[in-house]
């Protein structure tokens, strides 16, 4: 293998220049670099909102690469076949990529690495998506962690590498390979009219993500612990959107938070704990690869959850028309902004899985279709945590009462007024935007009457607890 042969850099969820170990090492070789993105089965299976948001991330990243003298090559097809074709076309002697930790990606990458190495191609994977490799964090007995608190204690004092700098320039090959046109992929097709609404709220690209982090550190991290549960407050970093697509690195965020803690910011440690909560989710999904499909605790397989995704009750939950204002505002926030406040996610998940007794997989799949910050590990752990079936789960008897949650976390009803139009004399623009974003087939309009409650909160809670008692008795 020639030391001057090109290196194919296979980008996935790491669409940035800085804090990118793979890119830093590749740039240091002085060899020609060929950045590639492959639209394979994993990309095609993404939900409507994540796929649309990915398209924006790719467009921005291609512009960033162009500023460094590089191009992003787009190819569609089976990843192994696409890489083989690129190697033949370019004479590349290496294929490098940043690791992913879900089961399907690991299986795909392992097969590709084995095949390439058998043919003398330098196939390497690099850390980058998480701070701590899932196999490197073990309990004292050599096992895996299933509870967050001891996981946090195990990693909080570990060294986190400083982020690598963005290369000043990327060496180009003599000839660039042919590329698909990103526009021809129509990654936003399934978003339909909702794209124009959500586009007003996105923060796309590495530079914008870094500005978002800097703004959070400057104005909000001090009050993060005290204010983060109030959905109307501008108290969170909102970086989940950018972390999802790797527009900012997790080490960059960690060190910014750590520096703020050293300066005495009161909410900084709690912010770092939330970053580790994301690490914990990937730790669990790596070691329990079916956590996004099956109950983490197998005894919950006999719980009488409903699975009818087409029933009227589930449709009303999806539409934000349950008649429970906090739940409905949260669901509409997702259609208008592409994200949902974390407190709101817990409330809508609890309402679906407990008051409505609908399986958490129904909610998980809907979020996977509607969230621009969809993360397979965090989504799975979050839903199972609320449902009671997951690791370190909230006790099943903890049933969030949306009315009481609203009194506590939205006492002045600002959040609810922002996203609910029915009955309002002068609806907020975001409340009206929901009707521009939601599917036309729903036939909704702001002049409709406010819906009656789908489930009486007290009766729903009693039914959930009765089902839980039956499960325990049968066990």
Image (cartoon, helix red, strand yellow):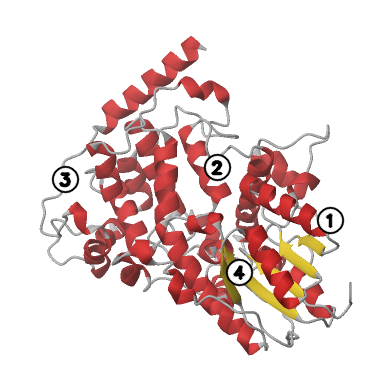
Q: Secondary structure at mark 2?
A: helix
Q: Is residue 420 above or below residue 391?
A: below
The Cα atoms of the two marked residues, 2 and 3, are separated by 31 Å
Between tags 3 and 4, which lies in front? Answer: 4
Position above or below: 408 against 186: above
The alpha-carbon separation of the residues under discs 2 and 4 comes to 28 Å
User: In the rendered image, which residue does mark 2 sit on?
Assistant: 381
Distance between mark 3 and mark 1 Cα atoms: 62 Å
Q: Which residue is mark 3?
A: 451
Q: CA distance from mark 4 to mark 1?
A: 23 Å
Q: Earlier in the sequence, mark 2 or mark 3?
A: 2
Quarter of the image with the N terminus in it: bottom right
> Comparing marks 4 and 1, which lies closer to the viewer?
1
Which residue is disc 1 drawn over?
118
Task: Assess disc 3: are there few (<14), some (14-19) or many (≥20) residues with their C-alpha within 10 Å of its C-alpha.
Answer: some
For marks 4 and 1 on the same chain, the one whose residue lies earlier in the sequence: 4
Q: Look at discs 2 and 3 and give the one toward the viewer.
A: 2
Label 2 vs 4, first from the N-terminus: 4
Q: Are marks 2 and 3 in contact (CB under 8 Å)?
A: no
Cβ–Cβ below 8 Å for labels 3 and 1? no
Residue drawn at point x = 32 percent, y = 38 percent? 309
Residue under pointer 4: 37
């Amino acid at each position: 293998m020639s030391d001057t042969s090109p290196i194919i850099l296979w980008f996935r969820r790491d669409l940035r220049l800085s804090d990118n170990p793979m890119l830093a090492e590749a740039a240091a070789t002085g060899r020609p670099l060929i950045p590639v993105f492959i639209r394979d089965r994993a990309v095609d299976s993404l939900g409507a909102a994540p796929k649309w948001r990915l398209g924006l991330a790719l467009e921005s990243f291609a512009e960033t690469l162009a500023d460094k003298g590089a191009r992003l090559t787009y190819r569609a097809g089976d990843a192994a076949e696409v890489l083989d074709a690129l190697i033949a076309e370019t004479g590349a002697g290496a294929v490098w990529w940043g690791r992913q930790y879900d089961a399907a990606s690991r299986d795909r990458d392992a097969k590709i690495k084995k095949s390439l190495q058998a043919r003398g191609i330098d196939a390497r994977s690099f850390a980058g998506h998480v701070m701590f490799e899932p196999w490197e964090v073990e309990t004292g007995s050599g096992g895996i962690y299933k509870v967050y608190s001891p996981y946090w204690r195990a990693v909080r004092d570990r060294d986190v590498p400083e982020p690598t700098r963005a290369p000043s320039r990327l060496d180009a090959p003599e000839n660039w390979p042919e590329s698909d046109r990103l526009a021809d992929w129509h990654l936003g097709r399934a978003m339909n009219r909702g794209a124009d609404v959500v586009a007003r709220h996105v923060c796309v690209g590495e530079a914008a993500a870094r500005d978002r982090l800097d703004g959070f550190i400057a104005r909000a991290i001090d009050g993060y612990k005290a204010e983060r549960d109030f959905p109307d407050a501008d108290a969170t970093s909102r970086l989940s959107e950018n972390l999802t697509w790797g527009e900012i690195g997790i080490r960059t965020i960690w060190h910014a938070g750590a520096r703020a803690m050293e300066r005495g910011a009161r909410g900084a440690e709690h912010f770092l704990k939330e970053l580790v909560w994301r690490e914990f989710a990937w730790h669990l999904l790596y070691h329990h690869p079916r956590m996004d499909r099956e109950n983490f605790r197998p005894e919950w397989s006999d719980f009488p959850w409903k699975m009818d995704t087409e029933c009227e009750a589930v449709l009303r939950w999806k539409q934000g028309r349950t008649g429970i204002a906090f739940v409905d505002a949260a669901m509409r926030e997702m259609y208008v902004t592409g994200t949902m406040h974390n407190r709101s996610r817990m409330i809508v998940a609890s309402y679906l899985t407990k008051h409505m007794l609908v399986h958490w997989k129904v909610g998980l799949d809907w979020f996977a279709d509607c969230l621009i910050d969809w993360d397979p590990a965090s989504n799975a752990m979050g839903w199972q945590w609320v449902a009671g079936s997951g690791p370190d789960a909230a006790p099943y008897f903890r049933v969030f009462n949306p009315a009481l949650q609203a009194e506590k976390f939205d006492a002045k009803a600002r959040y609810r007024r922002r996203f609910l139009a029915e009955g309002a004399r002068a609806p907020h623009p975001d409340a009206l935007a929901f009707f521009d974003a939601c599917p036309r087939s729903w036939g909704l309009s702001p002049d409709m009457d406010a819906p009656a409650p789908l489930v009486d909160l007290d009766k729903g809670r009693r039914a959930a607890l009765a089902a839980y008692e039956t499960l325990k008795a049968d066990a």
